[in-house]
Amino acid sequence: MGLDVTTRRDILMRFGAVAGTAGAYAAMHALGLSGDEAWAGTPDLQPGSGKGVRVVILGAGVAGMSAAYELRKAGYDCLILEARTRSGGRNFTVRKGTVIDYGDGTVQTCAFDEGHYFNAGPARIPSHHQATLGYCREFGIAMETEVNWSGTARIQTDRLNGGKAFEMRQAIFDFRGHMAELLAKVAQKGALDDKFSATDRDQLIAGLGQWGGLGETLTYDGCEGAGFEIEPAAGKVRGQHRKPLPMSVVGDPFVQGMAGFADLIDMQATMQQPVGGMDRIPAAFEAHLPGVIRFGCEVKRIRKKGKGVEVYYLDKAAGTPQVAVADYCISTLPLPVMNKIDSDLSKPVKAAIARNAVIGDGYKIAFQGPRFWETEAHIYGGLSFTDRETFITWYPSNGFHQPEGVLVAGYNFNGDMGKRSFPDQVAYARDTIERLHPGRSGLLRAPVSVHWGRMPYSEGLAAHITERDPAGYELLIQPDGPIYLAGDYLSYVTAWQQGAFCSAHRVVNMIADRQKSLKA
């Protein structure tokens, strides 16, 4: 089933939901349709101001761990309860031996060779996400460039160009050339004379000629920017650029939306990734929180108790019920999970959680294989797009010129692929690669997939409540007695680590302000 995309807004909204990361924020921001909560930097709490104050934090994702990290600087006594046996939440890097257990009997074990990996959750960090990058600097996490857009990456849809894939740069430069020719000829015929002086018109036409690569007769016949049919070489081999694709192909809304996705502010160069996997970030937090995180602890009930809170949980390893008593509770649990927990939160808060308990889904499938995308297609990083269920094919930005690499053959924000059987997912993803790289899909091996809607303790990828339930958002960003909620979904940077950090920092500051008022 293809994506039913007809307008630029639809395309941006769909890509925003995927973006790896970006949700509605990226698309809405690019369209000027939403606001931001400014990030003022990490909390600067007075040392010792939290002495004797206990905080129980639900979830060892980056929101929960950053909250504990900042509170502990001020002397707060923090405990993190995490149901999984690992930290990071949706920050999840899959490598050799990683087990993906959906809890329903469906289990995969990653069979990549040692040293290979793929980021099943967040996989890139925009340059303006300084909360995220700030922690990378603070913890000394080695970083490298994440190549988000490549001119040699491809776009393919069965309904255009005879189903044959074509390069991003063709979509960009051929569209630009066709549009420049159209506007230049319109201006030349005087159709814009009521808008421009003769001098302005001539300057416009000259500028369009340069911008669109037009010939002397203001005709577009292709340009070097769109790529070569014959590469320039020595002797008499001058090189020859490709003949342009027709406007009916490059002007298609799907094509333009995909070719221009890097115009979104959260997709613009230069983006970064931690060397060795995105889970280097939660690993660094975990190293700075010795003895703070209790793994395998599933929260069952939350109760306000006097001026504080009691959290009842099951220690899954021991099989025994436990209770944590604290002055404050910060829940960073996903809304589908929080909705199932017995609590005495106020009725309006419970209703807001329940309204938003079904959240956006997400799916990735990856293979290991020889780097034919580099040696044959000259693609080094970047994303290719199809209008299939797999949507995005993501090429690795690390290990250039190594014999093999990990190719993400499908990344989409809906659950359609995840509903297929694993063998069917693999066959479908191979078919996508065959469309983009004919004859090469059979070279891929060791497939592994992650469907976030089926992942225990996540049950989805992103909750875009700032758009779909503004009233609920306003309610959930306020404390309910000693209980606070935090997470990327309680920010305007949904589905990015930046949003999780911003939300956690806000809650940390709110608790610190509350403590100041109690001491005043």
Image (spheres, grey):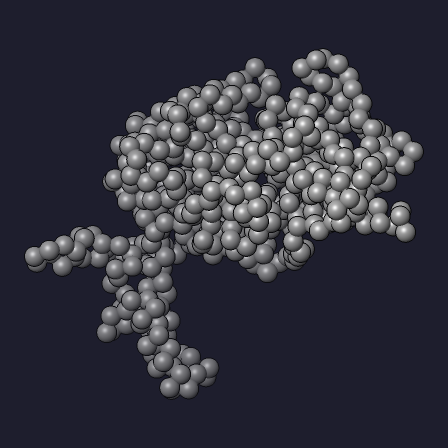
Q: Which residue lies furthest to the left in this view?
A: 235
Judge from the rendering whether residue 234 lies leftward or rightward of residue 7; answer left or right: left
- Residue sitting at 70 percent across and 22 percent down? 297
- Residue sitting at 49 percent across and 23 percent down? 98
Q: Residue 420, can we see it? A: yes
Residue 457 higher or lower than 492, as above or below? above
Residue 459 at what x, y percent from top left? Answer: 63, 30
Q: Quadrant for residue 218, please give it.
A: bottom left
Q: Quadrant for residue 65, please give it.
A: top right
Q: Residue 132, can we see it? A: no
- Residue sitting at 45 percent across and 53 percent down? 270
Q: Quadrant for residue 346, please give it.
A: top right
Judge from the rendering whether residue 464 lies leftward or rightward of residue 418; answer left or right: right
Q: Nearer the viewer, residue 31 or 144?
A: 144
Residue 31 higher or lower than 300, as above or below? below
Residue 265 higher or lower than 455, as above or below? below
Q: Residue furthest right?
A: 306
Residue 414 at what x, y percent from top left? Answer: 54, 36
- Residue sitting at 32 percent across and 77 percent down? 206
Q: Which residue lies furthest to the top in this view?
A: 319
Q: Which of 210 and 396 is in front in this view?
A: 396
Q: Which of 108 and 422 is in front in this view?
A: 108
Q: Which residue lies furthest to the front in this view?
A: 48
Residue 69 at what x, y percent from top left? Answer: 67, 40
